[in-house]
Amino acid sequence: MKVKLLSSVAALLLTTQIQAESAAPTPSYMMPLAEKAVLTDLIRVNDQLFVAVGDRGHVLVSKDSSHWNQIQTPVQSLFTSVYFSDDKHGWAVGHDATIIATQDGGQSWQLQQFKPETDKPLFDILFADANNGIALGAYGMFYRTTDGGKSWLDEFHLELVGAEDQEYLKELQETDPDAYLDERASVLPHFNRIYQHNNVLYLIGEAGFFATSSDFGKSWTRHPEFYNGSLFGLAMTAKNTLIAAGLRGNVFRSTDLGQSWQEVQHGQSSTLNSVLTDAGTIYLTGNAGTLLVSQDDGVSFTSVPTQDSKAILNAVAVKDQLIIVTEAGIRTLAIKKPE
C-alpha cells in the first residue's frame, strides 16, 4: 500500500526546509493549503478514516477521502510514512529520525522520537499490534518498540550485512570498538520498504537489497540481489505473487515468495514509488505522473494517463477512484474497473 523513498523524488524533498538545525522540535504550522503541499504517503485506516502525511510535519485526515483537515503535529520534519495498527493507534515517521503517534484516530499526535543529530531519515514503519513495531530507514537504521512507542531501541542485525562485510565487522569489533560503531552506522544500505504478508516480513532497499523474516524482524535472511538498483515498492497480489518496483521504472515479479524474480517489461522509465493491489488489479505509481495498471497478476502493465506530470508517491483505491498523494498534494483519479 505504501511507498518509502529514497528515490529521485528525494532530490525534491531534500531541497525543502528540513528542521535539522535545532535540537528542539517546533510544532507544525497550520496551513490553509496543506492538502496542496508535498505529501508522501497515505493510508486507508477504514471506510471513514484516511490519513496522509508529508512535508513540514503535515498530517491530514479525512472521513470520506474527499474533504481533508490538517492536524497539528509536534514537529516540522518531513514525514515519509504513516501506519495504523487499528482504528485508533497510528504512527508516522520521517526525517530527523522522527516518530510521532496517535491514540485517537489521528485527531492528536504526540512526539515519540526526534533525533536531528543523526541527520538520517526514517522511511517506513510497521506494527504487528498496538505495542510491537519496527521503524527503519537510511543506512540501515532500525528501531523496535514493544510498548507502543513509549521507548524505541536501536537494533543492528549483522545477518543483513553483506558476507564480505560481516567478517570485517567481526574483526573490527574485537580490535577497534569505536571504529566498529562508526562503520556499523554506514555499512548497511538504505531500508526503503517493509511489507508484511501472513507471518513473513519482506524488506527491500538500496542496490537491490532484499531480505525476509518470519519472527517479526528478530532475525533475517538476506537474499541474493536480483537487481542492481534501488527498490521502493512491494506488495503481494491476490494470487500470492510478489511485485517489486523501483528506480528507472524497473518492475519485477516473483511467484515463489521471492526465491526467484522475473523482470516485467512495460516501456516506461520513470522511477516507481509504490505498489498497490486492489480487487485483482495492481497499480504502480511513480514520478512524472506515472500510473501503470495490471489486471493479469503483474504479467503485463498498461500506462494510464494522469492529470499532470507531478510525481505520484502513493495511492489508495476507493470504489471507482484512486486517491493519490503527489508532490503537489492530494488528487483524485477516476479508474475503470474491469467488466
Image (cartoon, rainbow, N blue to C red):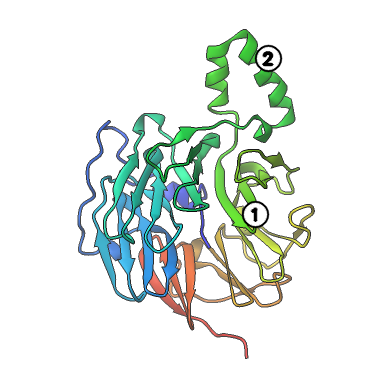
- Image location of residue 223, percent across then percent down: 74, 43
Is 62 placed above or below 134 here? below
- Image location of residue 331, percent across then percent down: 39, 72
Amino acid type at mark 2? Glu
User: Which residue sits at x=67%, y=44%?
Assistant: 211
- In what element is the residue under mark 1? loop
Q: Which residue is mark 2?
A: 171
Residue 213 or 150: which is nearer the viewer? 150
Q: Is residue 114 left or right of residue 277?
A: left
Residue 259 or 85: which is nearer the viewer? 85
In this rendering, the count of numbered labels is: 2
Point out the frontmost of discs 1 and 2. 1
Is 177 placed above or below 326 here? above
Q: Neighbour class for label 1 at 10 Å: few (<14), some, many (≥20)?
A: few
Amino acid type at mark 1? Asn
In space, the residues marked 1 and 2 are separated at their CA atoms by: 34 Å
- Image location of residue 34, percent across then percent down: 27, 61
User: Which residue sits at x=60%, y=53%?
Assistant: 247
Residue 237 or 18: which is nearer the viewer? 237
Q: Quadrant of residue 281?
A: bottom right
- In what element is the residue under mark 2? helix
- Image location of residue 84, percent across then percent down: 43, 58
The C terminus lies in quadrant: bottom right
User: Which residue sits at x=49%, y=53%?
Assistant: 129
Residue 199 tag number: 1
Is residue 120 at all visible to an observer of this figure?
A: yes
User: Which residue sits at x=54%, y=20%?
Assistant: 181
Is residue 36 at all visible to an observer of this figure?
A: no
